[in-house]
Image (cartoon, rainbow, N blue to C red):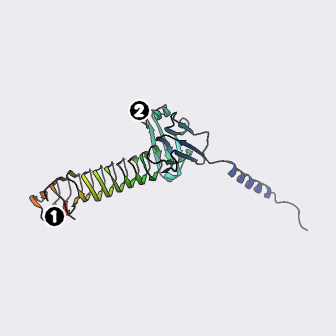
Amino acid sequence: MKSNRRNPLALPVAFLILISLLAGTAVATEFEKEFTFDGKELLVSNMIGAIKIKESSSDAFRVLVSVKGDDASEDLLEFIVQEDGSALAIKFPLDDHTKYVYPALGRNSSTSIHFQEENDHGGSWLKKVFSGFGGKKITIKGKGNGLEMWADVTIEVPARHILEVRHGVGEILAAGLQADLSLDTHSGPISVENLQGDFLADTGSGRVAALNVEGEVNIDTGSGSVHVANCSGSEVKVDTGSGSVEAEKIDCGYMLIDTGSGRVEARGIKADKAKIDTGSGSVVLQLDRMGDGKFVIDTGSGSIELILPGDASARIVADTGSGSVRNKVEGADVKTAERDELEMTVGSGAARVSLDAGSGSITVRQN
């Protein structure tokens, strides 16, 4: 005879599954905000998230903010717009939360931001927005305890406009623009591609890439590699405290590369004058065009290789504290040729070249 008794565990299990499914659909973990700005210049400030910058199809800036994370809530964030519509600040709940979780950092990664009122957070308006947070230390981890919430931002920029971004932690990507960009982040990579306009990048820690830029380029990173390629403008400047620098196919009036520690390789360079200075690291400079200005390469420790164009005209002085100096330019007028010292003239000697290595070999050759 078939029993009509029910399994006493069946109802509770089914009930728990149903409650779990309903809870998963009832709790929102993401919301969006959209803003439009009609001015010619815009400042956007954010603390955690990824920022993507692209071309606008209209004459106005459009900013889409997607807030994500298990703790994402409209009650926790403030969106502050300057009265004249020239700035937007995404303000995290720093009064109540100083620890945040941002999975994009990676499970074992963390970084900290120190808010100091005496510093310029992007102008007097942002100083006012963040007043009261002076001296606070904000910690962001890839995993662990803290508020899991971040704001991904997409910014659409009209042609011939100016955008400034002040960011805390997260990558910044920009592509396909006709605009001037100033991008500043505490920690995170910055990448710009296909830009017609001036480009300024400043990151405390993170790699920077500038590809296909028509305009002035100015890159400053405390720690991180730098790659610039197919860039043309009056100036191309790179300054990194620690990190390698790779430059290729650069056409400019003045090129400056300064690194505290890191290898520098610059090839296909067309410049009126240039300076490369590294505390420690080898340097390669290959010139396709050489103006009649001053060209200086100085490394505290590392080899130097200078490759001159076929029509080079320069007076060259090379010196190394420990190492050898080699001349591989045929037909040069050599005045001094010692093991650690070289002075010679190529062509009519229009440009002035100074090569100095504290420790390392120096080689001069010609294409």
The label on residue 171 is none
Q: Position of residue 51 (x, y in %)?
A: 49, 49
> In front here: 124 or 139?
124
Name the residue type under label 2: Glu
Please identify the quarter of the rendering in which residue 184 is found: top left
Q: Tell me the quarter of the image containing the N terminus.
A: bottom right
Foreground mark, 1 or 2? 1
Q: Seen from this angle, which residue lies furthest front?
A: 59
Question: For mark 2, what is the residue?
Answer: 118
Name the residue type under label 1: Val
Q: Residues within 10 Å of mark 1 (few under 14, many from 20)?
A: some
Which residue is found at the position 46% from the left and 44% from the top?
Answer: 167
Q: Tell me the quarter of the image containing the C terminus.
A: bottom left
Q: Position of residue 4 (x, y in %)?
A: 88, 62
Q: Position of residue 213 (x, y in %)?
A: 38, 53
Question: For mark 1, what is the residue?
Answer: 329
Q: Is residue 299 left or right of residue 229?
A: left
Query: Is label 1 in contact with label 2 (beta carbons under 8 Å)?
Result: no
